[in-house]
Amino acid sequence: MSTHASAELEPASAYFGFRTPCRYRLTRFVFLRALGVLYFFSFLTLVNQWRPLLGSHGLLPVVEFLAHVRAELGSTGAGFWRLPSLFWFGSSDGFFMACAWLGLALALVVTLGFANAPIMAVLWLLHLSFVKVGQIFYGYGWESLLAETGFLAIFLVPGWSPRPFVEPVPWPVVVLLRWLTFRVMFGAGLIKIRGDSCWSDLTCLFYHFETQPLPGPLSAAFHRLPHRLLEAGVVFNHFAELVAPFGVFGPRRVRLVAGIVIIVFQLTLIASGNLSYLNWLTVVVALSCFDDGVFQYCFPKRFRRAAPAEPLPRVRRNLTVALCVLVGVLSINPVVNLLSPRQAMNASFDPFDLVNTYGAFGSVNRERDEVVLEGTWDTGPDAHWLELELPCKPGDPERRPCVVAPYQYKLDWQLWFAAFERPEQQPWLIHLVYKLLRGDHEIDALFARQPFHERAPLRVRALYYRYEFAPHASRAYWQRELLGVYLRPLSLEDPFLQSYLRRAGWAR
């Protein structure tokens, strides 16, 4: 649809002396519905996994974490300004779950088409509150990306009415979403060029699909593509992350092409693996590249005619100007970070995660090593060991890789990282072993197969395997080779375990 035709639908809006002839009400409608879906999956993950991971009897209890931060900083107030969260003022399991269910309900409301500033503000505050106390399980880039996107959404929606078309769209907020799109993509591109030579010699995709945290059903097919095609995939990666982002600020046609390239690139990543909601959320943010001229053919006429022509109220316009100034000031550190040869990946520079820097796969593993937990009821050297199967992490070689994103299995993801460090550097892992030995049923929800549900094992260990995709003609999906013992067999009476638990304050 031409720019002139778009202008006939709505009078131009003016900010800072600039005018835009494009219209974004349908864009806002699609953006908010999609954002509501991702909020829903984020809070669903909390509802299902918070207690065993971070509850009062979880692997890394938030109550203990907050007490440690309070003692270190000297007061609750200082702790709040370092880690802003509602849970400084109430940290019972009941309060955590009430907030998670409230977030899930509000996300469903937004998904169904109703959103205003108070609803989006509550969703943002709830999500940020969980992320700030979620420790290692919530320390990933998509969590801060959702926080930043959710904050901008507060200023994009109508002030009070939850109906989607009652107010014009503040055009500068759409531009801020494009600025976020630029930082997400360009930051990811720079961290790759600076981080691993395989991105320069075009070989990274020879390994990525096999060694990524949680491969999907199509990952093996991507891995088996001809090397020339995989090299072309790296070139497309560089174009999508280092060139296309500049197009989001260009003229309409350039902007639409840039948005299409970014979204197509993200869809290939979605098809090839499970990266939580990172790629899904990047698609949602990149919708800001499109105006109503793109979306109008997907909606009935009553949606296209539902918007009033009056300008935004003066208060909303002033708030939008203030938001632009705030984001501009807070963007200084992320821009300096982008330009730095020591670029930090997925870094936040303000306690509320309002403007961040992003990146993914600055380095790519050449081989896939996995930690596999086992338990036994036997005590002798010829003990019969049984594997504990997680929902999505590679374990049983004959089990098909799963489709789980945008949902995330937190323990599966964290065990992938555990293979890069020694077990004693993973307090949550030692605590998990202890809970298995004690027969703690709360952690059963984290496993797909837990053979010790009825009777706790006498010993637990972790083995170290190297996994590769099985040959195409094989009935198995993986083939694996035992590399050794990652964590020696532990029992409840083991001196190392008891000493570790006492230092962490977990001994019973």
Image (cartoon, helix red, strand yellow):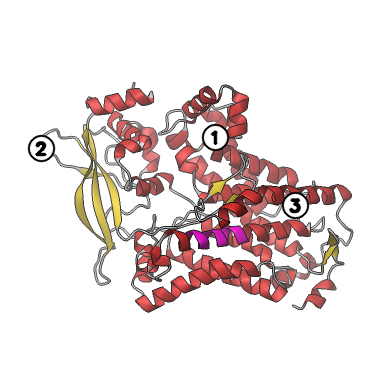
CA–CA distance in space, label 2 to label 1: 44 Å
Q: How many marks?
A: 3
Front-most of residues 497 and 123: 497
- Estimate the x, y position of residue 200 in percent, counting from the top left: 43, 68
Q: Quadrant of residue 226?
A: bottom left
Is residue 62 shown above or below 412?
Answer: above
Q: Nearer the viewer, residue 428 or 361?
A: 361
Q: Earlier in the sequence, mark 1 or mark 3?
A: 1
Residue hosting label 2: 381
User: Magenta span has 186?
Assistant: yes
**Where is mark 3, residue-wise?**
324
Of tags 2 and 3, the one toward the viewer is: 3
- In screen coordinates, is 271 left or right of 476? right
The residue lying at 78 percent from left, 70 percent from top is 301
The answer to whether marks 2 and 1 mark residues whose Cβ atoms lie closer than 8 Å is no
Cα separation, mark 1 vs mark 3, equals 35 Å
Three-letter code, disc 2: Pro
**Does the magenta stretch mainly form a helix, a strand or a loop?**
helix
Residue 46's place in the image compared with 466, above or below, is above
Q: Specify few, some or many for label 2: CA neighbours under 10 Å numbering under 14, 14-19, or 20 or more.
A: few
Magenta residues span: 182-191
Q: Secondary structure at mark 3?
A: helix
Identify the amino acid type marked 1.
Met
Which of disc 1 and disc 2 is earlier in sequence? 1
The mark nearer the N terminus, 2 or 3, is 3
Name the residue carrying label 1: 97
> Label 3: few (<14), some or many (≥20) within 10 Å?
some
